[in-house]
Image: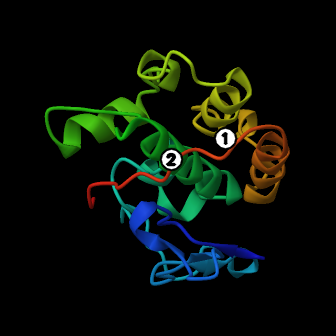
Amino acid sequence: QGVLHRDIKPGNIMITTQGQVRLTDFGIARALDAGGGQTMTGIMLGTPGYMAPEQIRDAKSVTPAADVYALGATLYAVLTKKLPMKGKNVVEALRAIVNGAAVISPKEYLPDLDPVLEAACMRSLAFNPDERWGDPARLATELERWLKHNAPPEPVELDPV
């Protein structure tokens, strides 16, 4: 839609009583055509655990690939009830993300996880933005294709982050 959300996480995704998904909290979003906008170098915007490596390093450099990463981290959390990167504290977790520590496959927690769903999740969490889905719509298309051939997962309650 031409907007970088920059804070996609389970708490910012709502489901209406009609079952429609709505993304909320556009407080740090910016238009794609706004360039660097008002974001200052050195300022980190987003929620740790859902932020892409490039977003942690420099909020001005984010592209739609950062939102794809956040969607992948959200999918990972919904599937496993865990974040893709962990640390003893927030700084340690952020350091792991920035340094490209390998994400543990959700299949480690869910051995019966469909390989297509696992691949979609892991591609979304690629360290290199060029290796992720080109934009959130591409990921959505892949997940919709998967849903047409599989029963949707049971809803889960996530701990607030």
Question: Residue at the location (57% across, 71% down)?
Answer: 5
Residue at the farthest left position: 88
The answer to whether 123 is drawn above or below residue 94 in the figure is above
State the image quarter where residue 157 is shown. bottom left
78 relative to 85 in the view: left or right? right
Question: Which tag, 1 or 2, sits closer to the chain's start?
Answer: 2
Which residue is under mark 1?
A: 129
Q: Callout 2: 10 Å neighbours few (<14), some, many (20+)?
A: many
Which residue is under mark 2?
A: 52
Asked if marks 1 and 2 touch (Cβ < 8 Å), the reply is: yes
Nearer to us in this view, 56 or 123? 123
Question: Which image quarter holds the C terminus?
Answer: bottom left
Nearer to us in this view, 65 or 16? 16
Question: Residue at the location (45% across, 60% down)?
Answer: 9
The answer to whether 2 is drawn above or below residue 119 in the figure is below
Question: Residue at the location (69% across, 76% down)?
Answer: 3
Disc 1 versus disc 2: distance between alpha carbons? Answer: 8 Å
The answer to whether 151 is drawn above or below residue 23 in the figure is above
Q: What x and y, as percent, mark residue 37?
A: 58, 80
Q: How is the image coloured?
A: rainbow
Q: What x and y, as percent, mark residue 141?
A: 84, 51
